[in-house]
Image (cartoon, helix red, strand yellow):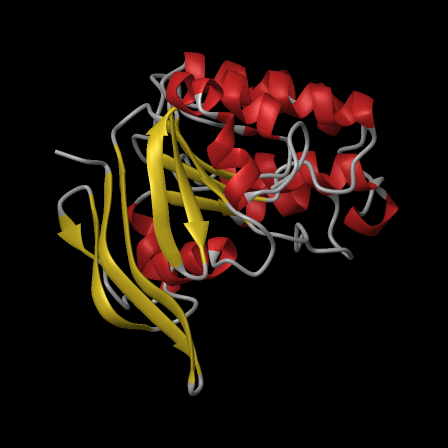
Amino acid sequence: MSLLSVTGLEAAYGAAPALFGVDLDIAAGEVVTLLGRNGMGKTTTVRTIMGLVASTAGRVTFRGKDVTNAPPYEIARLGIGLVPEGRQIFPTLSVEENLIATATRRPGGRGTPWTLDEVYRFLPRLADRKRNLGAQLSGGEQQMLAIGRALMTNPSLLILDEATEGLAPLIRAEIWERLAALKAEGQGILLIDKNIDAMLALADRHVMLSNGRAVWTGTSAGLAEDRSVIDRYLHLGGTTE
């Protein structure tokens, strides 16, 4: 059984259609990416999965339960942790308060539950800044806080929308290293980012979106062997979306 299954997903913003039958499956412990240029439907797919955008057709199931158009809090409680585009941390709360605000004790995607101590061990920069307000952190530290906050929900599936966007190279490298460690621990991940090479190294499979449709699905090996897919749907190699 798939951890997450998305079938024929359609969505719109008012009268403007945005998704046209997206199909997507993620198994437990698998890392899958959504690829595509800006405006092709990646964030809309994530927001529709999370119940933040209403689907107009199709079905979303998580751990065998139909969650199509369920309230976002119910979807989160079932075990999906979201690191949203733009981080959206609480700027007037401390690092520790941000982490505690989302803490949930449930079986997640790893054997050891995520606690404050576990998050601080995994993301030591947060331990160093735990008394600082969210607004006092750098962009990279805020992204790590957003990841730590999602981990504190003990998710079976972690979704990251623009995992390293706008971050300094050293911070980007650190986040990719942390994501690889999560994968090694059995964490299921759905990932959006611009760094195609890093995603090829990390992910098991990729789903390419174009104009709100899934136009290619395959493994990292398959995508690396057929760079024409990248040229056709991303137009640039290396670090494009």
- Residue 184, percent across and down? 43, 12
**4 left or right of 195 in image:** left
Residue in front for this viewpoint, 187 or 12 = 12
Q: Residue at x 51, y 58 (%)?
A: 40
Q: Is residue 128 above or below residue 206?
A: above
Residue in front for this viewpoint, 94 or 66 = 66
- Residue 26, percent across and down? 28, 35
**78 left or right of 230 in image:** left
Q: Residue at x 33, y 43 (%)?
A: 79
Q: Is residue 185 above or below residue 63?
A: above
Residue in front for this viewpoint, 123 or 50 = 50
Evaluate whether residue 76 shows in this view. Answer: no
Q: Is residue 93 above or below residue 208?
A: below
**96 left or right of 44 in image:** right
- Residue 190, percent across and down? 42, 38
Q: Is residue 82 above or below residue 17?
A: above
Q: Residue at x 72, y 29 (%)?
A: 126
Evaluate whether residue 80 shows in this view. Answer: yes
Q: Quadrant of the N terminus?
A: top left
Quarter location, residue 10: bottom left
Quarter location, residue 177: top right
Q: Quadrant of the C terminus?
A: top right
Check the image and name the residue furthest to the bottom: 15
Q: Residue at x 48, y 53 (%)?
A: 42
- Count up the numbered dots: 0
